Image (cartoon, rainbow, N blue to C red):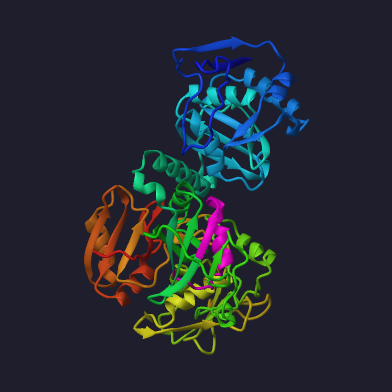
Amino acid sequence: MYVCWYSYPSNPALPEVLPINPVDTLVPVCRKRPPNFQIMADQRGSEELLSHSPMVTNGTTMSPQHINPDMNNDAKKVKLDHNQTGGSRVVHIRGLPSDANELEVISLGAPFGKVTNILLLKQKSQALLEFGDEDAAANMVDYHERTPAQIRLKPVFAQLSNHKELKTDYAHSFQNASAQAAIQALEAVRSGHPEDQSKTILRVIVEQCVYPIQIEVLHWVFSKYGKVLKIITFTKNNMYQALIQFVDTMSANAAKLSLDGQCIYNGCCILKIDYSKLTNLNVKYNNSKSRDYTNPNLPTGDAAVDQAVLPYPHQGLNPPLAPGGFGMQQAIGAAAQMGLAVPTAGSSVVHVSNLDEEMVTPDALFTLFGVYGDVHRVKILFNKKDNALIQMAEPHQAQLAIAHLSGARVWGKAIRVIQSKHSVVQMPKEGQPQDAGLTKDFSNSPLHRFKRPGSKNCQNIYPPSAVLHLSNIPASVTEEQIQEAFAKHGTVKGFKFFPKDRRMALIQMATVDEAVMALIAMHNYQLMDNQHLRVSFSKSTL
């Protein structure tokens, strides 16, 4: 064990205590020797070292008598594992609090060098922290061997990992996005302009607000990135908005980078976030529209204020939370724990009427309604073929289909989409006459857009538009080939490949009606032997 000492003229035997707050002083340990720096070999055991070392992390200190007695054994194991492991840029951290976030773990390692990646394993209370070089990782482990770290007053332990670097796979894609946002937030605070240090208030706009958003849910979502001090909600331009004040700039920046463009609930309630010019929120009442978490004794104000709600089109539904952002049903569970009303879910089945009975097929309805959710079953009514029942995977997907497709023109007719009284679409029973293929089960279809948790499709749901987004285009397919295929379903007005990714493109049809027909016909269109085109509505213009 080696202990690092700085010798200052005023106190020649003052051990260096490293500040962990990344916004303050960021000093790497043992990377370069200052003029009066000396390394002293210490032959004491780890128990004695721990008993004489203050616990320092995030600016907090623990005296030796507060150290968990089991921590000495853990510290021995950490040191043993570290000695058995070769050089690595990755530090393995264990013993984390169950609700620790990426920003807290990154702050633990930030003083030792540039953090390049993090993988938070919440179920195991562990994390893997990757640095830009091996020296930074070794310095962190060496320092915390003699000065045990803690997060939220809980001791945590660090050792070099057997992994030389972190490679995040698809299963952790959204967690990786959150981690990169936290890293960017730290770097932004480090290198930002002085005026940026005061930006602690975010302006949040909630688009496609299909479900009601309660102030408690906003607090639960945003407090994952730091301490939220105040929230004020309001309606402007017929849109639900909020001002959210954090305790510091880093937390606000991390929340902005992580949540901007994300959905609170699957496919809807999309967050658009920017900084506010305000420096402080003046909250007068603690009620359903505003909250000061630093002053719980504020009055509630007029009782009518507490009862004020926005005119959401689908109140009374229990929406599932977007899997990429926060974990399915967690916000609903959190709301229930706060004493909020959690209503029951609606039906997953929609009733579609005014269809063209000469043109409609189960496959066509599967493709069109599949833009807004995973269609499990379609039944065209035998005695009324301009009507159909469509069963979606989730009730909120049925609501999205109603919101975006009711009134849309399909085969020249404006269709009507409402919620059905049926909870499921029944398949014909065995032994009964078949219904001439009018009922079809798509439960196991490989064309479902939303079956994978965290799919980007959840964030790109738009109403029918003249511009279509194309993806999965083979490199050998030309613009002329694509335009020729779409021209069979209407007039092509424009086309553009994505500059940085030629596998995607935008194509504009003459009308929205033609675009709807083109999507039905061209989604899953075979371009090559094993490559099929993917088509969806776009918010972009050409």
Q: Is residue 449 visible?
A: no
Q: Would you say residue 419 sits in the magenta stretch?
A: no
Horizontal relation, residue 364 to residue 102: left or right:
left
Tell me if residue 377 comes above or below residue 478 in the rendering: below
Tally of marks = 0
Give the residue displayed 58% in from the left and 42% down from the top.
120
Q: Is residue 240 visible?
A: yes
| Residue 16 coordinates in the image, percent (x, y) | 55, 22
Tell me if residue 97 comes above or below residue 160 in the rendering: below
| Residue 183 coordinates in the image, percent (x, y) | 46, 41
Horizontal relation, residue 394 to residue 274: left or right:
right
Q: Work out whether residue 124 or residue 254 is closer to the camera in this orientation and state it.
A: 254
Q: Work out whether residue 522 or residue 184 is closer to the camera in this orientation and state it.
A: 184
Q: Work out whether residue 147 or residue 497 is closer to the camera in this orientation and state it.
A: 147
Residue span colored magenta: 207-231
Give the residue displayed 50% in from the left and 73% down from the top.
210
Q: Work out whether residue 331 or residue 414 is closer to the camera in this orientation and state it.
A: 331
Tell me if residue 304 comes above or below residue 329 in the rendering: below
| Quadrant where the image shows the C terminus | bottom left
| Quadrant where the image shows the N terminus | top right
| Residue 229 coordinates in the image, percent (x, y) | 54, 57
- In this view, which residue lies farthest toward the right? 69
| Residue 293 coordinates in the image, percent (x, y) | 58, 60
- In this view, which residue lies farthest toward the front? 10
